[in-house]
Amino acid sequence: MDLTLLIGWFLAAALIVNGITVEKLGNFWDQPSFVIVVGGTIASLIACYPFRMLKDVPKHIGTCLRGSKKYDVPKTVEQIVDLAMIARQSGLLALEEKAGEIKEPFFKAAVLMIVDANDPDKVRFVLERQVEDMMSRHDEARGMYIKGSALAPAFGMIGTLVGLVNMLKGMDLSGSGGASSLGQDMGVALITTFYGSALSNVIFHPIAQKLAVREGEEVLYCSTVIEGVISIQSGENPKYIREHLLASLQRGQQTKLLKKADGGGK
């Protein structure tokens, strides 16, 4: 489980509270400002996006909190190398039974495609098309949070204008009163800007960025699978396949995994 999003939220909240000081924290709560910014942002997102996307918000949060082990590239490479060894010894048809043991749908479908003796170009085209479709869906979901990151400060500005208008309307330059509400109206004007900036930079933007990181992990995994099954179908040497697929990792990690593989083969 990846807790960095929650840790970041906690640290941001703690630092903001520390800057405000606890005894003055009450000065930063204003219900009308909160309703304008949070309520307005949510309302605009509802107007912008269909329900099929809005209902997936809990799923998106779960994706952000999910660890990177779901798409473990080194482990996947070793699985591909094992399949390559079986294919060289017994042929591609021998992989059908092994495909049934693979739980990840994309990997399983890729192996079954080469078992069915599809043309390599067709296999690559179909699998890459699936990855492109997946990326389009992810970009659409991430765009919702990017939009929220833009809307929150905008509603903060709307709240600021509301507060300023009320303040100016309540001013009585004749000296007969009207100054009692100036502080409250000015507070609404400033606090809405604060709420909008916090909502944008602490909530929406980190979620969008974390979803981009998760997408990168999944794309790397899928690319590894595609290159791996194509190499198996081409009859490449398992050792070459391992070196080729690990090339996408950091140099230090590559060296460590290759040494481990060579040691295991002795």
Image: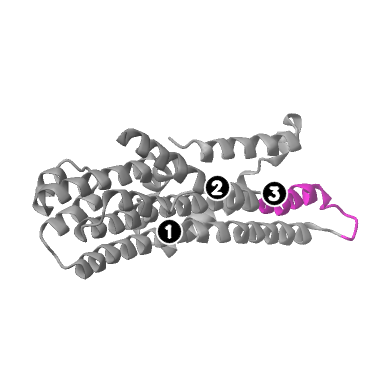
Question: Counting other residues with Cα less than 10 Å from the Cα at mark 2, is it few (<14), some (14-19), or many (20 or more)?
Answer: some
Q: Quadrant of the N terminus?
A: top left
Q: CA distance from mark 1 to mark 3?
A: 24 Å
Amino acid marked by disc 1: Ile
> Residue 247 versus residue 30: which sits nearer the camera?
247
C-beta proximity under 8 Å, tags 3 and 2: no
- Residue picked out by circle 2: 203
Amino acid marked by disc 3: Ile
- Residue picked out by circle 1: 46
Mark 1 or mark 2, which is nearer the start of the sequence? 1
Vertical side of 170 occupied by 101: above or below: above
Which residue is drawn at the image coordinates 66% and 34% (left, top)? 14
Query: Residue 201: image x %, image y %?
Result: 61, 51
- Residue picked out by circle 3: 191
Query: Residue 258: image x %, image y %?
Result: 40, 42
Q: Nearer the viewer, mark 3 or mark 2?
A: 2
> Residue 247 versus residue 211: which sits nearer the camera?
247
> SS of the residue at dot 2?
helix
Lateral position of residue 75 relative to residue 184, left or right:
left
What is the tally of numbered marks visible in this picture?
A: 3
Vertical side of 45 occupied by 4: above or below: above
Give the residues in magenta. 173-193
> SS of the residue at dot 1?
helix
Is residue 237 highlighted in magenta? Answer: no
Q: CA distance from mark 3 to mark 2?
A: 17 Å
Mark 2 or mark 3, which is nearer the start of the sequence? 3
Q: Which mark is residue 26?
A: none
Question: Counting other residues with Cα less than 10 Å from the Cα at mark 3, is it few (<14), some (14-19), or many (20 or more)?
Answer: many
